[in-house]
Image (tube, helix red, strand yellow):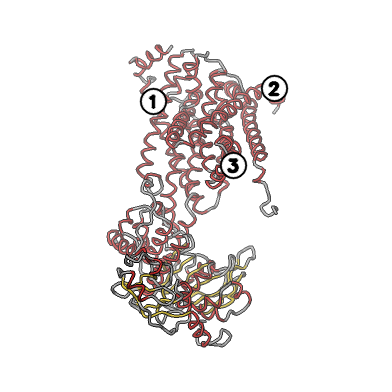
Amino acid sequence: MSWILDHLDDILSLTLRHTWLAGVPLIIGLLISLPLGWLANRHRRLRGVVIVGAGLLYTVPSLALFVLMPLVLGTGILDPLNVVVAMTIYTIALLVRSVVDGLGSVPEEVARSATAMGYTPVRRFFGVDLPLAVPVIAAGLRVAAVSNVSIVSIASLIGVNQLGDLLVDGFNRAISGELVAGILGCVLLALVLDIAIRVLERALTPWRRADPGGAA
Amino acid sequence: MIASILDWLTSGASWSGSDGILARLLEHVGYTLLVLVIAALIAIPLGLWIGHSGRGRWLVTAANALRAVPTLGLLFALTLVLLPVLPGSAAFLVPSVIVLVLLAVPAILSGTYAGVEAVQPAARDAARGIGMTGRQVLWQVELPIALPLLISGLRAAVLQVVATATVAAYVGLGGLGRFLIDGLATQDYASTAGGALLVAVLALVLDAPFALLERLVVSPGLTGRSRSLRPSEPNRTAPAGGTT
Amino acid sequence: MIRLDGVTKQYPDGTVAVDDLSLTAPDRAITVLVGPSGCGKTTTLRMINRMIEPTSGSVTIDGQDVLAMDAAQLRRGIGYVIQHGGLFPHHTVERNVAAVPLLLGTSRREAISHARELLELVGLDPALGRRYPSQLSGGQQQRVGVARALAADPPVMLMDEPFSAVDPVVREQLQDEFLRLQDELGKTIVMVTHDIDEAIKLGDHVAVLQVGGRIAQLARPAELLAHPADNFVADFLGRDRGYRALGFQNDRVPLHDEPVVPMGATVADATAQAGSDGWVLVVDDRRHPQGWARPADLPGEGSIDERSLALGGTLARVDGPLRVALDAALSSPSRRGVVVDGDGALAGTCRATEVLSVIEARARPSDPGEHAAQAVR
């Protein structure tokens, strides 16, 4: 406990870096997964390709992906960009499936009546399909967030700084306070991201909170 | 850079010996199988029991909450705690295996449980209604229907274990992770990247038998494979008599 | 005979699903439990095969206390059909049908070959046996559910909303075939439905349950329609009660000779036969009615063929229910209802006014009439 209090500044700056390394890929990954999932949902053949591809990407172990990133990107081995891109890949691998499932969960009759009323495909996507898919996508996003926070800590092994540094240093020097601080920091960050996504989901889906008996 | 990696991957020297690629590969596969068997022995019966009896659902929730704990932190913490207690080489192996099992259990547990949970209430009701005992319902109905999700859980566990076993090289475990960790320490990028490629390929290769297993043991009635024949209503007998 | 005696089901939270209910389901008859949702009809059914254990009271089948029997053994001896069929998705259709015989230790080959026969019995192509349930339509799945329940030839069957998951046309067909099957097999059946029309159509006895798990009335369908015990039952029976009751009153109606022309007759012949309203009945060579034609509307040179016929009239049978006779008259283009004999050949035509006279001459609903049910409990 005293170790934590003595190093609050370090912990805070590492937490911010950790949030950035885990959070930015989450947002980029979501922005890429939405159109990809939309396309995959519309074209049966593409769906198989996307889902199998996502499964393959997710198969690559994290440390291996971090290490191989410079080969693909031409970056230096210590470049944080390696981690951001690798985490974005994981996020897409997880989320594309959620987006496909989410869009697929939109009731057929709702989608059809939207088309019958004259929604263009784009309007229908933003006005009907996407809002109704939010719960499933949010569930995927929460899994990705928690997984990202855990995986990012491994980047300490390739020298990219974040909360994982506390784990590595705490282990190497057998400082249990530091190790615990690292673990707690990661768990708390995962929790905060999880809650943030839940809050956002609630805000985006007011109809799910409506009292079923309350409506006139 | 790519040339040096290829050199490393193709040279006979890197493949042979007790710290060569072949030995490390076998170690890695060995850990994975060991961990998977232990985790499956714990998680599958537990998941079946929770799904069948509806009791102890909190265990699934708790196991899933474990995923928020960073793998690296769990690995380091357990190694630090167990290191002084364990003799010799077991000190490196045991904590890693325990952590890997801890990581594999939630995936298999929630897959098994979700599989049993996915059994339609009507099928379970009918199974009891036609006179199956609790055990028969479990073996003849719930387990076969749970198989697709159970196997997905196993596959997720395999990926998790292969990836984390790589990281566990940092606390002294053998396996392909050695090339990454040692290569990073000595700034030997060829061996680091070569090791990374091998791990990626291993993860893919180990996934394949499970995909095959799924094809073999899952009933075509549960997958889309039999759906090519569309439902039809052509086989009715003559319509009922002419009077209303 | 299935006998429920003072059966009560109370859940730990205090809700009483079934309250001191007594009921006898006679052998070889269909006893229907009908009522609004929450009336405890399904709970009652499920207490018979101990899917739910009664809190108090006794349930016996042919004098044997079910509570004293091993639950699984008991259930293997009772056919069980539920909504959607409750088929096992991972088993083929024939393996589904063979489920109970296999549980009872019948050899696989025997069980499967018997399963194919049963598929045929319920009106399915035995070739469907190799498919999986997901490849069948809802109606087909429902038939497989019935076949599975029949597989071990149990004397007793319990059916929970067996026909409600399919569209009305298929449902009607399944009900008709089910009645035909029951004529043949004579099972002792207890069935649950929320559909009063289904209850009246299928039930030999109908128990109307009200919320709280009490029997509001137990009677034969005709008696139920003619003499509902109270307002609840009357409301539940709904509209057109008097008309629907005619469906249970069989009587001869006065028949008139009807001039006919055979299929293929010339329009000139048909014109000669046609009545003053211009309509003439067309029959085939076995005198089975084919439809009405109006020669005046047809080209003079032609002959009577399929396309000349006005369809839509229903057929009544001699000795059939008065409801059908009345409907035959009302639905006929000529207003003359076509009545056929047991073989389907023309017996004559009837008039709506005369059917009404027959109805008028019979007992009023308020009379304790000839159709009062024999007490069933």
Q: Secondary structure at mark 1?
A: helix
Disc 2 to disc 3, how far (Cα)?
45 Å
Looking at the image, residue C239 lies above or below residue B76: below
Query: What's the mark number on residue B25?
Result: 1
Q: Secondary structure at mark 2?
A: loop
Report the number of numbered marks.
3
Disc 3 to disc 1, how far (Cα)?
46 Å
Q: Nearer the viewer, residue C268 or A69?
A: C268
For mark 2, name the chain.
A
Q: Name the spot of residue B136 as percent of width and height, x first.
A: 41, 57
Looking at the image, residue B55 lies above or below residue C174: above
Residue type of the residue flagged with mark 2: His
Residue type of the residue flagged with mark 1: Leu
Q: Name the spot of residue B149 as percent of width and height, x first.
A: 46, 43
Sort mark 3 into few (<14), some (14-19) or many (20+) by Cα contacts within 10 Å: many
Q: Name the spot of residue B102 as percent of width and height, x first.
A: 51, 36
Q: Are marks 2 and 1 on the same chain?
A: no
Disc 2 to disc 1, how far (Cα)?
41 Å
